[in-house]
Image: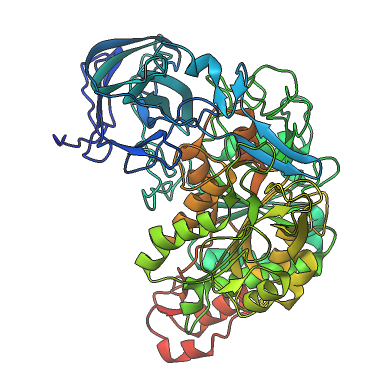
């Protein structure tokens, strides 16, 4: 396969001079260049394997598992790339024109399997989301499968636009395989070049400013750590890379907040505390409540202050909280499960979350337009909820400080706990569903990046009932085993199950009363395997980073929600859903383009294992996986981080003393200044280091 050279996008484009921009690799098989008015993008097909499944259908396999997940339609490769657009240019696309193609028709007859539906399990049974304008029969959209037209109709498509700080992108999809269901033919688009004509320039200056917070134009989930903002904010002498947005009540009642600020400064951050005194005078968009005013403050200041991390400390209740989550309506046009509560509203600051002006924020498709919601985070956001319990807040703040400076054996942080339930069974109504076993996610995590990076694991899979997990595990999944194992301390925890605000559940097929080999209503048993009250048994000196792959475990209006209960004891950071979350029926592997709750967890945990800070890891996972579906938008909005966005799994920070009084020497005066700023630290060892800069780890 031909290998392209890789040339970095030029940072300066002077007026309308001819500029060439290319980017390609053997992994991504694409290149692009800009000629001053249009963008030319070329793709080459990656290695494709056509595999016959046990059902007799065909599956196209490719190395990075990128598939067009359009439920009920043929499951074909989809390669998505972020194509940079000069900052001066409009994101309006006038046209996309195919310049040249090289295609090959394969011999033989193919029956491509359909993409499975998104699934939500409720007390009243399974809810399936197939998308709009489809006629589903036995899991297939017969409007496509009975047609002689190719699917997809076009080999390239612009999915969305994206703005991140001063940078702009087009989200472009390439489909290397086109399927003709009517005659079973396959056409491989081996090479293609397209021309994208943009709208008029918005300014006369064509300077291209690269992004200042982590950007991954290749859309590759294993991209690693990304660039950070400059230390000095543009246009001013003062920068604050770490901002705490809270309330006067927290400032007045917390005994640890000032210590926490000094601690963050001692490990190298510049910290600003913002309260209602700073933002209530601002005018945000309707309804102009606290959420809109907080976001307006961030919009006004994130660039000139160089803000990188935002920690929200306060009550997240969207109705009466002092630092509320934003209530959004990604499924506004559906009859149920319409809303999600999100802190991502404070992360994506360049997008208009109500671009249609109806005060229903974050709607799909209404707010999925150029200039609307694009999930590109300008800042990385986390939250410590406060429900009028300031002693608990102080405990969490102290735990964060201890975690970031912990000494001794840290090997426990590379131990992973994997309690995962079966979510639905084979032939469970509707009868064409395949089993969805959370152990599939656990096994992918183990095989793909835990073992290769010297992590150890302890697995708990479903072993009870008539159709249990086929994977061997270290212990059967039940409440006693999860509590006992977790109490020993783990660095990472990924729990998969059904959920409500305070519990995560397993479901097993307990009986087949009518002996029809079908798990029907009344023949399955649902029981919790971990609850909010169980967090009391956990070792808070060895707190975990936790991903809860379930519904509603982060329900913010309930002060006893599981995500927060774990943050209080047993966890250092939790990611959980504020409302329901959707999974792909029969999930077996992650898709880098499609954030069902399994894939979202896979790529988030992979980044944590790479020691990327948790707030950055969650934001990058979301923006790399953005997809166009109301239920997928609900997942992207609904999963929130409870915890400090700046902490990472392994990195330990040092507290340093230096010439703090500026007299040219490091002496007892400097030590006294450090002790005053950090009263929680034992600084006695500095007495041996006067005369030079010294650190305590």
Colouring scheme applied when the structure was drawn: rainbow
Q: Is residue 64 left or right of residue 407?
A: left
Q: What residue do we see at 25% from left, 23% from top?
A: 106
Tell me how many marks there are. Answer: 0
* Residue 562, image x, y percentages: 74, 59
Residue located at (50% from left, 25% from top) = 73
Give the x, y percent position of residue 598.
55, 48
Q: Residue furthest left?
A: 2
Residue 486 point in image, percent of width and height: 63, 74
Q: Is residue 547 in view from this perspective?
A: yes
Nearest the viewer among 383 and 436 is: 436
Judge left or right: residue 74 versus residue 632.
left
In the depicted structure, whether residue 9 falls above or below residue 248: above
Along the line of sight, the residue nearer the viewer: 562 or 613: 562
Q: Which of 561 and 22 lies nearest the eye of the viewer?
A: 561
Which image quarter is the N terminus in?
top left
**Does 87 sit above or below residue 641?**
above
Asked if residue 610 is positioned above or below residue 584 in the image, the reply reads below
Whether residue 679 appears in this view of the structure is no
Residue 535, quarter of picture: bottom right
Residue 526 position within the rendered picture, expressed as x and y whole percent measured from the top left: 77, 57
Q: Tell me if residue 574 comes above or below residue 36 in the rendering.
A: below
């Amino acid at each position: 396969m031909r290998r392209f050279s890789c040339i970095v996008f030029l940072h300066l484009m002077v007026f309308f001079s001819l500029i060439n921009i290319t980017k390609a690799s053997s992994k991504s098989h694409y290149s692009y260049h800009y000629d001053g008015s249009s963008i030319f993008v070329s793709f080459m097909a990656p290695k494709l394997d056509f595999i016959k499944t046990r059902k007799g259908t065909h599956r196209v396999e490719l190395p990075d598992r990128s598939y067009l997940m359009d439920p009920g339609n043929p499951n074909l490769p989809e390669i998505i790339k972020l194509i940079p657009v000069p900052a001066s240019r409009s994101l309006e696309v006038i046209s996309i024109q195919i310049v040249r193609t090289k295609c090959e028709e394969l011999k033989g007859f193919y029956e491509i399997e359909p993409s499975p539906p998104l699934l939500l399990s409720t007390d009243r049974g399974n809810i399936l989301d197939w998308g709009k304008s489809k006629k589903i029969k036995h899991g297939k959209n017969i409007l496509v499968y009975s047609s002689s037209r190719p699917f997809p109709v076009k080999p390239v498509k612009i999915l969305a636009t994206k703005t991140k700080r001063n940078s702009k992108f087009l989200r472009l999809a390439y489909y290397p395989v086109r399927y003709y269901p009517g005659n079973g033919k396959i056409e491989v688009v081996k090479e293609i070049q397209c021309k994208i004509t943009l709208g008029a320039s918005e300014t006369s200056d064509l300077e291209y400013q690269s992004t200042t917070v982590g950007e991954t134009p290749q859309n590759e989930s294993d991209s690693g750590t990304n660039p950070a903002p400059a230390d000095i904010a543009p246009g001013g002498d003062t920068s604050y890379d770490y901002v705490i947005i809270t309330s006067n009540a927290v400032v007045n009642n917390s005994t640890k907040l000032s210590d926490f600020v000094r601690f963050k400064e001692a490990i190298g951050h510049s910290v600003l505390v913002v309260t209602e005194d700073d933002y209530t005078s601002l005018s945000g968009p309707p309804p102009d409540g606290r959420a809109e005013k907080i976001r307006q403050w961030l919009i006004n200041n994130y660039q000139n202050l160089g803000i990188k991390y935002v920690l929200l400390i306060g009550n997240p209740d969207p109705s009466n909280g002092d630092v509320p989550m934003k209530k959004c309506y990604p499924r506004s046009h559906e009859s149920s499960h319409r809303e999600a509560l999100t802190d991502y509203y404070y992360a994506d600051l360049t997008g208009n979350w109500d671009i249609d002006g109806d005060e229903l924020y974050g709607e799909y498709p209404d707010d999925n337009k150029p200039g609307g919601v694009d999930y590109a985070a300008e800042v990385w956001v986390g939250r410590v909820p406060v429900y009028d319990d300031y002693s608990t807040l102080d405990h969490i703040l102290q735990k964060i400080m201890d975690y970031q400076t912990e000494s001794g054996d840290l090997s426990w942080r590379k131990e992973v706990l994997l309690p995962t339930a079966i979510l639905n069974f084979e032939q469970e109504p509707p009868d064409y569903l395949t089993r969805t076993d959370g152990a599939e996610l656990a096994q992918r995590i183990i095989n793909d990046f835990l073992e290769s990076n010297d992590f150890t694991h302890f697995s708990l899979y479903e072993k009870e009932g008539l159709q249990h997990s086929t994977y061997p595990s270290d212990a059967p999944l039940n409440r006693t085993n999860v509590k006992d194992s977790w109490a020993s301390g783990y660095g990472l925890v990924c729990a998969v199950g059904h959920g409500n605000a305070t519990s995560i559940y397993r479901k097993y097929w307990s009986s087949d009363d009518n002996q029809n080999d079908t798990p029907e209503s009344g023949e399955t048993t649902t029981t919790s395997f971990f609850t909010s009250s169980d967090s009391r048994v956990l070792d808070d000196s060895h707190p975990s980073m936790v991903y809860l792959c379930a519904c509603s475990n982060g329900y913010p209006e309930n002060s006893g929600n599981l995500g927060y209960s774990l943050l209080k004891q047993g966890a250092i950071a939790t990611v959980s859903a504020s409302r329901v979350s959707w999974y792909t029926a029969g999930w077996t592997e992650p898709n880098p383009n499609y954030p069902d709750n399994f894939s979202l967890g896979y790529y988030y945990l992979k980044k944590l294992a790479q020691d990327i800070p948790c707030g950055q890891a969650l934001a990058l996972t979301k923006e790399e996986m953005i997809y166009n579906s109301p239920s997928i938008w609900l997942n992207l909005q609904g999963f929130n981080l409870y915890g400090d966005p700046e902490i990472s799994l392994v990195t330990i920070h040092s507290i340093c003393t230096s010439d703090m009084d500026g007299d040219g020497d490091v002496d007892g005066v400097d030590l006294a200044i450090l002790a005053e700023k950090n009263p929680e630290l034992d600084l006695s060892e500095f007495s041996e280091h006067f005369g030079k800069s010294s650190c305590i780890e």
